């Protein structure tokens, strides 16, 4: 018996749709980290580290 006869017709289309949605979700997350910044150093720690 042929295995192709037992599969629904919409299986391949639904797999393609799920793959496309997965790619869109992964690409939609790119660049969503927010602004990047460097925290200001604490003055007490910077002064004590310079004297050692």
Image (tube, rainbow, N blue to C red):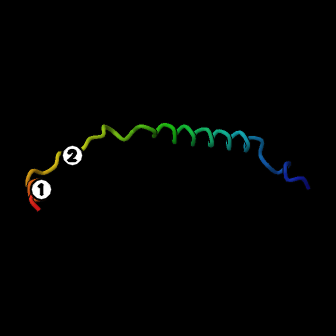
Towards the viewer: 28 or 1:
28
Q: Are marks 1 and 2 in contact (CB under 8 Å)?
A: no
- Looking at the image, the residue that sits furthest to the right is 1
Relative height, residue 39 to residue 48 (above, below): above
In which quadrant of the rendered view does residue 30 lie? Answer: top left
Quadrant placement of the N terminus: bottom right
Residue topped by disc 1: 50
Residue at the disc numbered 2: 39
Task: Please rate how many residues cluster around mark 2, counting C-alpha atoms within 10 Å: few if below 14, some from 14 to 19, many from 20.
Answer: few
Kind of element beneath mark 2: loop
* Quarter that holds the C terminus: bottom left
Q: Label 1 neighbourhood size at 10 Å, few (<14), some (14-19), many (20+)? A: few
Q: Nearer the viewer, mark 1 or mark 2?
A: 1
Identify which residue, 27 or 1, lies in the foreground.
Answer: 27
Query: What is the x, y in percent for residue 9?
Result: 77, 41
Query: What residue is shown at x 16% (from left), y 49% (from top)?
Result: 41
Viewed as shown, does residue 51 lie left or right of 23? Answer: left
Residue at the (89%, 53%) spot, across then down: 2
Q: At which x and y percent is residue 40?
A: 17, 45
Residue at (12, 56) in percent of width and height: 50
Image coords of residue 20 (percent x, y): 61, 38
């Amino acid at each position: 018996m042929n295995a192709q006869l037992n599969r629904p017709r919409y299986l391949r289309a639904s797999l393609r749709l799920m793959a496309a949605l997965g790619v869109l979700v992964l690409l939609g997350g790119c660049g969503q980290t927010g602004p990047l910044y460097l925290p200001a150093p604490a003055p007490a720690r910077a002064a004590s580290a310079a004297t050692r």
